[in-house]
Amino acid sequence: MLLATLLIDYSILRETLSHAPNTKVTWEQSDLTEDGDHQMLVWVDGEVAAFDAGLEADPTVNAPLQVAEFDDRRLYQLELTDDGKRASVYPTVIEEGSVLREVTATHEGWHFRAAFPSSEALERFHAFFVDRDLDVELRRLQDARETADGSRFQYGVTDRQREALVAAVDAGYLDIPRSRSLAELGERLGISPNATSERFRRGVETLIENTVYPDGRSP
């Protein structure tokens, strides 16, 4: 499984967001109906009045089917026009068995964080935009594999090792001077100091081997 973060000049809602530069859209879900319609739910934060005005001239979406307000946010149910459906990458995502983890958009473009079952699936996702002369930039790529017990590897680091590495940063264990001792870090993780040291050391070693060490190999 590959985890990729991409910045894309996506045409969906491009016109709307150009009228609302201080607005952020967060994709919630998409639905493909039996009648061939494509609906999506998006959260909107920021200049909702400007966003609404932009929707009227946007060739990729129809008028909102529904709008719900929650505190300072709005949830829009939108239906894509024929132009929008032709521009949508979502059917490709479904066909490839990929998963959209996080999708947001501003007037600068769309940020996709997605999981792909293979490098070929990622290449086809990338080609979808290239074939339409749209700019797409791969910002980050991670290899995430699952073990037999369901735990996940990122750069070969297990979930527990990742937890220890993140906790070390959050707790100030890596500060100069240190804000927390190894024993205090272990208390935070609920394990002994020895187990904390072992987990942290193995996590750092594996991370280095799979990132900055030449050819990704240990000495």
Image (tube, rainbow, N blue to C red):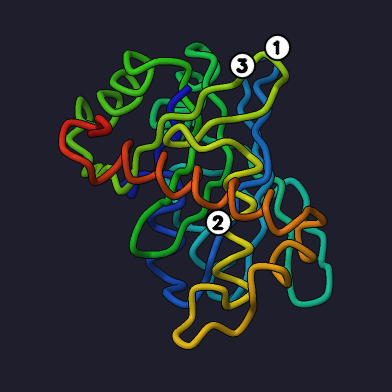
Which tag is nearer the camera, tag 2 or tag 1? 2
Asked whether the beta carbons under mark 3 and mark 1 sit within 8 Å of each other, the answer is: yes
Residue reaching furthest to the bottom: 177
Residue 165, disc: 2
**Is residue 156 toward the left or the right of residue 141 in the image?**
right
The amino acid beneath tag 2 is Leu
Point 76% across, 58% down: residue: 189
The amino acid beneath tag 3 is Gly
Point 48% across, 43% down: residue: 113
Q: Is residue 110 above or below residue 214?
A: below
Query: Which of the 4 image quarters holds residue 149?
Result: top right
Residue reaching furthest to the front: 194
Point 35% across, 24% down: residue: 125
Residue 131 location, x and y as percent? 20, 25
Q: Is residue 167 above or below residue 126?
A: below
Task: Look at mark 3 in the image and give the residue it sits on.
Answer: 36
The kind of secondary structure element at disc 2 is helix
Q: CA distance from mark 2 to mark 1?
A: 46 Å
Q: Earlier in the sequence, mark 2 or mark 1?
A: 1
Residue 185 location, x and y as percent? 69, 67
Residue 168 or 202: which is nearer the viewer? 202
Label 1: how many Cα within 10 Å (few below 14, some 14–19, many 20+): few
